[in-house]
Amino acid sequence: MSFLSRSAKLAFYCSTACYLPSVVNARGIENNFSIPSQKLTSAIMMFSRQSGMHVVFNGKIADTLRSVPVYGKIEPLKALHVLLGKEAFTIDASGQNFVVLHRKHVMKSSELSDEKLEVVGHHSLLSQKRHSPVVVDSVKYNDTSTLVGASSVAQLLSLLPGVTGIQDGDEPRFISVRGISPDLNQTTISGITLATIGDYGGGTRRVNLQNVPSEIMGQDDIYKTFTSEQDGGAIGAVIDMKPRSAFDYKGLYKYIDAWGIYSPTKGTATQNGVSGYPTHMGQGVKAVLSDRFGSERQFGAMISFRYQSRPRNASKQWTDDDNFYTASGKPVLDSSGNSVPDRSLGWDGKVRPGGIGYGNYSNTITNIGGAGRLEWRPTASHWSASLFGYSYARWERSIMNHTEAYFNQNSLADMGNGIEREQVNSIYTYVRRNRWERDPHGVIGDLKWEDARQKLELRAGYTWENYSDYEPYLRARAYPNNLYADYSRSGNFSHLVDLSDPSILRSSSYKWASIYNYQEKAREGLTNVRLDYTRNIGINARGFGIAAGFEWRSLNVTDHQTPYNYYKTGGSANSSIFFPNYVPPGSPYTFPWINIVDFPWSQQKLDTKTSRNNDLESFYRYREELIDGYASLHYKWEKSELIAGVRADSIGFTALSPMVSGGNATGQISKGNGGYVIPLPSVVFVHEFPHSVMLHASWSETLGRPMPSQIAQGESISSDPDPQPGKMTEQSVSRGNSSLKPRRAHNFDLSVDKYFDGNKGLISAAFFDKMIKHDIYDQVTYGYVNDVYSSITQPMNAQNSSIMGIEFSVIRNNLHFLKQTFDLSANGTYMHGHMKYNIGEKTYKSPQLIDQPKFILNGSATWDIPQIRGAMRATLSYTPKYLTDIGGDGPWQNSGYGSLLSLNLGFWHNITDHITFKYEVQNLAGAGRTYRDGSHLQWISEKDYYGRTVYFHVMFH
């Protein structure tokens, strides 16, 4: 290889590295290093990340050598000298940000021809954010520093600005972005849309990110502003996950993490008579293996595996705040006999419980599965390709014991000292077991051709998700005589103080109120193919550029509860009632439970008519086909960029729903069709001001497509065969609505970002405003169905909705303070939204959107401690209360989540060059989950306590 050829090749690599963030002169500045002995190639990569310097070297030689360990606060060049030891390289540090490593002996011409240079640099997420024409926030997975042994993509994303983790017990399952429901996010892997059955097989569009282990993804991006090049079905955000790549490493990479779990909350795992529910201990293991091979190392392969089983036991308390009185203690009733908080009817402004209950939850969660990726990146070709596949299973085995005392509204008495008394009308005790299983799978392929100016990419994938649940359910009730409950109220929650005669709980006659079991199965499969072309688009592009593409997507979802076995009720339940040696937290007494283990299912008489109706009514199938195309024109100046484009979405759907006549399912299926074609324009402007200040301004139109279940659900009619005393006997009817229009959103965004210290720091402020037409909510009306007065629930389009907010974030990496090094991040978002909707003939205005808190606070801090070859990391997120459901009778029946503070702490250190110990505490503050009711969610209706969880890891690398 000639001198000119080698110089040209070196210039090429350096030109690639110039996209990476600039750093200050390495001489005279000390950095904290923690680099164990390992293959020299990977050690140089760690050095580059920890120093911010870029290194050019011969990767073929470095792959055969081992490094010298480096720990402590050292000037970067001195650290590099130590790292290399007396091996085959000398250091050329003539450049400010680049280091070139030369072989020590003089190479012959034949050796020069084999010389293969590698350039390694730290491409930070802040650098990516800075150069992106749309607003994006990202997080990278790290095998060591990512917290919580049960880590998922949902947990990683929950720390980013404007993101709310929608909780499932003690960990997030979905995410809301900028106050927009998870159903209005578009979630992809490498741009391919994921299939989802939502939460409980309900045919939603929210992707369960709890099911995506974080270690299979290298980077996760949340795009908050949109161009026509992105999917049009996102009002909240486009969430794109990028699988890990073998090309992130120069050779063999291996990592194994084994951990034990301790959960202090025991729950009732030893009290309910059901074996197989661990009380405290769990365990897990995950592994990642990666390598490159081929004559030019043009092939890469990476596989990962995860297994975990952990207990998640909990205690629960309920108070049904739905009794309202006048100052004289008389119930406040509307014309239908329902208790209402109406000042015009004399309501005294206080809420009293209609019942108080206690529950205990024994639960075991198991995850198992793996992922793999095969890649081809030849060095002398414009072509590249990859194939990625994953298969995971998450199942939960749970049992819930729940007993509740319901009160007579006509018996309020003031006992003094803040204690009030009501007569107990009934005692209801419930037990249910669930075997939930959610299994996501997928295969995604990518074929790409690109040169310096243009790129053509074909992506295709098939993803599918299965859901199943087997649930046996028993409910018994008793009507005790002359039993009174004393309660007090504090913190907007009612607490049972005493019962007038607790022995009545044991002497009462219990009868069966509900006996059933069913098996629910749901499946969604999604095929996605897209072709994208770009020309003259990128960081160094100038002048006109173009992006254009085409996409086809086919979605099929089926949901069915079968067999649904509903049995005759009313017989004595006393033989199945028992009193455990257990007092629920917060309760003064032990309450009756049902023995589900020995329940004689075979002796029950099947209610054939109800079973058949429930079976047939629960079925639906929904098919959807999307075809869209887009064109986007870019013009880029040296400091500015303008993007204008349009996307056209064409949707066609078919809904198969059960037919109901006279309140009975006929066994026939109705077929409904629909669809729409909608153009979605967008404009984006970006400008870089002096002193590394970036301005982003954008306007776009996007869609919020109705959920499959909202369109395809058939009419379902139900009535409680054993209604609560004093409550109006009412038939409930729920229906789908094939006439729903998609939401139409106008999105305005303006953000200013200030970068400093060579892209190690960021201060960002953003304003956003979304105006949404045809928002969708569940409308409740009242009328006669089959000559029975009924409440009728049906999804409808709201009049309009809007949300605006301000988002602020600060990031500072590699901060030196008091001779220590920290990575710090903090962000906060304030949001104001509203939605107009109808209940019957009346119009209401909600002060929040569904899944929209008023504000969000997130933060993280990592303290690097080279003296012990380790670090400490803490993450914190706080979300106040927010709305999840609109009340059926009025805003006072609105419900939602209460505030939640999540604080996690981790600490790790190297024991040897290849072994690391790690310790974690999840939910360090011991916060519990609460649920709320009321027009402003002012009353707490349920308290759940899961407690802390402790992890101990042994990591091999």
Image (spheres, rainbow, N blue to C red):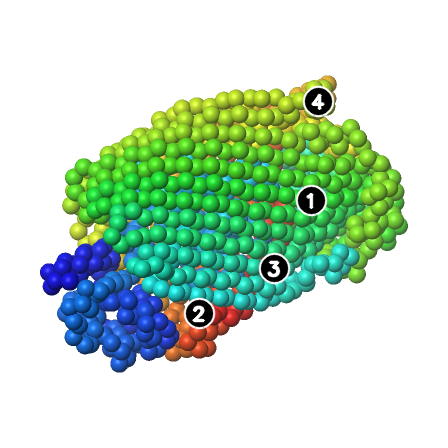
Tag 1: amino acid: Tyr
> Mark 1: which secondary structure?
strand
Q: Residue 676 is drawn in which quadrant?
A: top left
Tag 2: amino acid: His
At horizontal 78% and vertical 33% (from top left) the residue drawn is: 721
In the displayed orientation, state which residue is furthest to the left: 4
At horizontal 29% and vertical 47% (from top left) the residue drawn is: 383
Tag 3: amino acid: Ser
The residue to which callout 1 is attached is: 470
The residue to which callout 4 is attached is: 666
Residue 811 in the image: above or below residue 163: below
Q: What is the distance, in whole Å, between disc 1 and disc 3 at their CAs?
A: 20 Å
The residue to which callout 3 is attached is: 309
Q: What is the distance, in whole Å, between disc 3 and disc 2 at their CAs?
A: 23 Å
> Mark 3: which secondary structure?
strand
Please state which of residues 258 and 431 is positioned toward the viewer in this rendering. Answer: 258
Residue 638: x and y, percent?
15, 45
